Amino acid sequence: MSEPVDLLLTNGAVVTMDPGGNVYMEGAVAVRGREIVAVGTVAELTARYEPRETRDCRGCAIIPGLINGHAHVPMSLLRGLVADQQLDVWLFGYMFPVENRFVDADFSYTGALLSCLEMIRGGTTTFVDMYYFEEQVARAVDESGMRAICGQTVLRLPTPDAPSYDEGLERARRFMESWHGHERVTPTIAPHAPYTCTDEIYHEAAALCRRHGVPMITHLSETAREVTESRAEREATPIGYANRVGAFDVRCIAAHCVHATEDDILLLRERGVGVVPCPSSNLKLASGVAPIRRFIQAGVKTGLGTDGPASNDDQDMLTEIHLAALLPKGVSGDPTVVPAREALALATSLGAQAVHLGHLIGSLVPGKRADIAVIELGRAHSAPRYYYAPDAIYSHLVYSAHSDDVRDVLVDGRWLMRDRRLMTINEDDVLQRAQAIADRIDMFMAEREVNLLDKILAIGGVQQAELFEVQAKARISETTAERIIALLNDPAITITKASERTQYDTYFLWEDDNKGRIRLREDHRLDPGARLEPKYTLTLTDPAVRGEYSSAVLLGRARYTAHADRTLRFYREYFQPDTVIEIEKKRRRWRIIYKEEDFAINIDALVGPHQPGTYIEIKSRTWSRKDAEHKTELIGELLQLFGVDENALFKQEYVEL
């Protein structure tokens, strides 16, 4: 007597991805409820089961639903926002500022829905996410019918949904509690990366994961620079550090791991960490090529991910599978490494193990969930087909199939797409809502890119000051410099403060002077008792309004100063100046009172090819023309006292020489 089932998929090439590598060219899959109950030939299953519905899959491959092991799905709304940048410029110069301004609950929900419909269309049934307002991502997953591990992101920096990391930890705790036990959503916490987190964040995250029995998600060793800086700061690679702070004491999903060392690889295997390279994103951001073949050889649980759509720019897992097969060949020079069957496993059976869901999904075997994709194989780019070799079907899927070849998708036996028609998401509505959000971001970016102050504000707060000062500069001999220093003990002069420093100034200039000028300063104090660490500042000055005097110049300008915590390369790539000028000087500075007025006396020794030599600079803040005229007279007296020849005076700033 035939057994009843809900669905029988028939006449397709069933690629089970089971441990035996079974493929049934004239195959069928029987589904009851949310589970697969049988896989085999059409003849066997039609004789054994009485389906409520039969779906003919002639000319198609029936495969396990694809698993996207690492994503930031709301970032589909930032697709195409910026490209061709280093990771730190991309992240800190564009992504974080835009996210801090625009990411809210609606952003995360709409972006997640957009990604879900894209992934369903590409045959992906499960994804691992880390983002903000993750309860909205979970909501989108629930409505779409997909399966996901949703990680609430936590950083030591303020985020769009948590002004501090302890509030971020609390938000993650509430999220995990409220969604715990959902059939298709696994709620968890996602410490962003070692370079954006603290030991405490990882300790607390591990405790939460242990309490709820869920895996932790984090980024590790994505770039070579990240590894170098981690060794310098923590005396460990990011992977070694993550192990040290308890990230591997629970099940862990580690994204990227592009620059894992051999010791790292062995550690990842020993601790059972799931590793998820993202080939397209790693290539686009020039992070490198992950050692996928070595991961597999070493027995590391290895999957594949798309990363966020802002750095990919799509969520097409068939493309990632394609690259996972090709890149190791190109890097190694060996065309046999990562064969097609193994590449497909990275997004199915192996990928399921990497995200710690191998007991539920990843292969078409009885007892597992009915997460299934049906892919047409007879289209122009995938025809004709060959049948003489059992493994030929893997080549068709890995090297020829496209995401738009996906015809049907099921999760837990429920149709999410049938005949390319989405069953759970209103595509037109989502696209319209996504474009409305993108239009607001587009306006913000257009205004920011032409305004240097906006660009500085986007990466950190600034202090603003309206600066008016009179100043005189002259080139002097070293002998004159020593005489001036001695004359500072004149009874008419009172020294209020003295300092000595070396300053490295990098000026970013534009052909359009109206844009202003940016100076990146590295200031090293050398006087006894001064701070040990150098001070880094970023200063924007608007075009100066000049007033000329006989021995001095009056400068008036708006000035904006911010703490600089990025590299020179970062700022150069971020601001994209037309000209860069570097000036190194050793500065001896005295703050003095002369005739009841404050002045700064600088003796500067300029080093390098740009007008090297010794200079004196006398300057004072001023707030009115009458005051400026008075202070100019006093500057003239000081110059005369110091014996500085008027012919040595010049009215340019150092960068203008």
Image: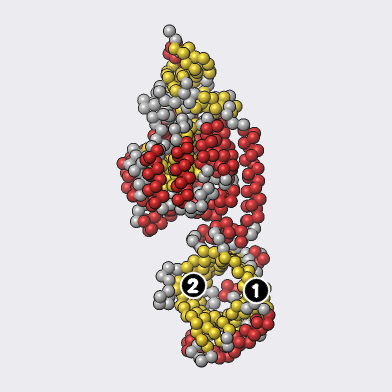
Q: Is residue 386 above or below residue 441?
A: above
Image spot of residue 573 (x, y percent): 55, 58
Query: Residue 115 or 26: which is nearer the viewer?
Result: 115
Drawn side of residue 158 relative to residue 345, left or right: right
Q: Residues within 10 Å of mark 1 (few under 14, many from 20)?
A: many
Quadrant of residue 619 within the rendered picture: bottom right
| Amino acid under disc 2 | Gln
Q: Is residue 640 above or below residue 497?
A: below
Element class at badge 1: strand
Q: Position of residue 629 (x, y in %)?
A: 66, 84
The kind of residue tagged 1 is Gly
Gap between marks 1 and 2, in whole Å? 23 Å
Q: Residue at x 41, y 56 (%)?
A: 229
Say whether residue 155 is visible. Answer: no
- Quadrant in which the N terminus appears: top left
Numbered label attached to residue 123 = none
Decide which of 541, 82 is in the foreground and name it.
Answer: 541
Q: As drawn, is 545 to the left or to the right of 600?
A: right
Horizontal arrangement in the rendering, residue 156 relative to residue 551 (left or right): left
Callout 2 secondary element:
strand
Q: Position of residue 639 (x, y in %)?
A: 57, 88
Vertical position of residue 375 compared to residue 647: above or below: above
Eye-nearest disc, 1 or 2: 1
Check the picture and name the quadrant holding the C terminus.
bottom right
- Say which residue label 1 marks: 556
Check disc 2: other Cα within 10 Å, few if <14, some if 14-19, many if 20+. many
Q: Which residue is mark 2?
A: 503
Residue in the picture at 52% in, 30% down: 145
